[in-house]
Amino acid sequence: FRYMQVDIHNKSSEPLKIYSIGLNFSTYPVEYRGAFNCSDELLNQIWKVGRYTLQLCMEDAYEDCPFREQAQWMGDARVEALINYYTFGDTKLIARCLRQIGQSQLPQGITSGVYPLRWPNKIADYCLLWIISLWDYYQYTGDKHLVEELYPRIKRALAFFESHLDQYNLLSNVPDWTFIDWAELDKRGEITALNCFYYKALIDASQMAQLLREKKEAMRYQKLAEKVKAAINSRLWLNDIGVYVDCRVGDVLSETISQHANS
């Protein structure tokens, strides 16, 4: 932080003397392993600020923020873990996160968007990011054991999403909360960003199945991913101006066009 405010309520008639003010700095025990340096000093400072910010968001879990919720949201954890691989190279904290989110899985297959907590918080895209993050983890660590451990839960999660495919092989009207971002997105019916996450999760699940020598499942996930990709391109692409719209409801394309659907 840059500033500290101290509010003093002294009910005594005697003056209050402050001899010192301090604090305890406590974060996850990271090691500064990654480095970045270039001729642009601004970029060097951005790297340092970003690295330090990440450290502040690492305690017993990846946190969305170190001062308010201090919660392990899967969407935040994925971004933080990707940065961590290059800055600190830690693998234990994200492995713990992936296990804990897996433990939050509900009977229908979806995982909680934030965990641990006392009640389920079902966020469709965060469940898909959990799947994607597991394959990220394997690519950066080569740890096959965690993939093997969580793969049965991955299958249950994907079965949940498959049950919400419409006749065009797109996720449509998935229950509970689709977050994507706080921006004013159009998130009705067939949501482009959500279906892109689903496509990526299927591709990654296919890779996991191949790793575990589950060839039939690998092929099935791959074929389903191809169907989803084709449906995204045929139903959510606005050819007149060359962009993907945010969503489609029936035969009507959304008038909202965002970076999220096109990046």
Image (cartoon, rainbow, N blue to C red):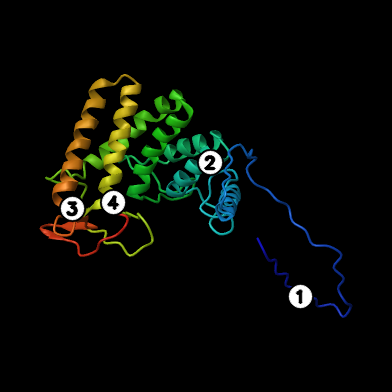
Whichever of labels 4 and 1 marks the residue nearer the N terminus, that label is 1
| Residue drawn where x is 20% and y is 35% of the image | 224
Where does the N terminus fall, quadrant-wise?
bottom right
Whichever of labels 1 and 3 marks the residue nearer the N terminus, that label is 1
Image marks 2 and 1: residues in contact by CB distance under 8 Å: no
Q: Nearer the viewer, mark 2 or mark 1?
A: 2
Q: How far is mark 2 from mark 1, CA to CA?
A: 42 Å
Per the image, the residue denoted by label 2 is 84
Query: In the rendered structure, which amino acid carries the disc numbered 1?
Result: His
Whichever of labels 4 and 2 marks the residue nearer the N terminus, that label is 2
Per the image, the residue denoted by label 1 is 9
Query: In the rendered structure, which amino acid carries the disc numbered 4?
Result: Ala
Q: Could you classify mark 1 by the number of other residues whose Cα lies within 10 Å: few (under 14), some (14-19), or many (20 or more)? A: few
Tell which residue pokes out farthest to the right in this image.
Answer: 14
Image marks 4 and 2: residues in contact by CB distance under 8 Å: no
Between residues 151 and 195, which one lies in front from this camera angle? 195
Q: How far is mark 1 from mark 3, CA to CA?
A: 60 Å
* Residue 207 sits in quarter: top left
Numbered circle sitting on residue 236 = 3
Per the image, the residue denoted by label 4 is 193
- Callout 2: SS: helix
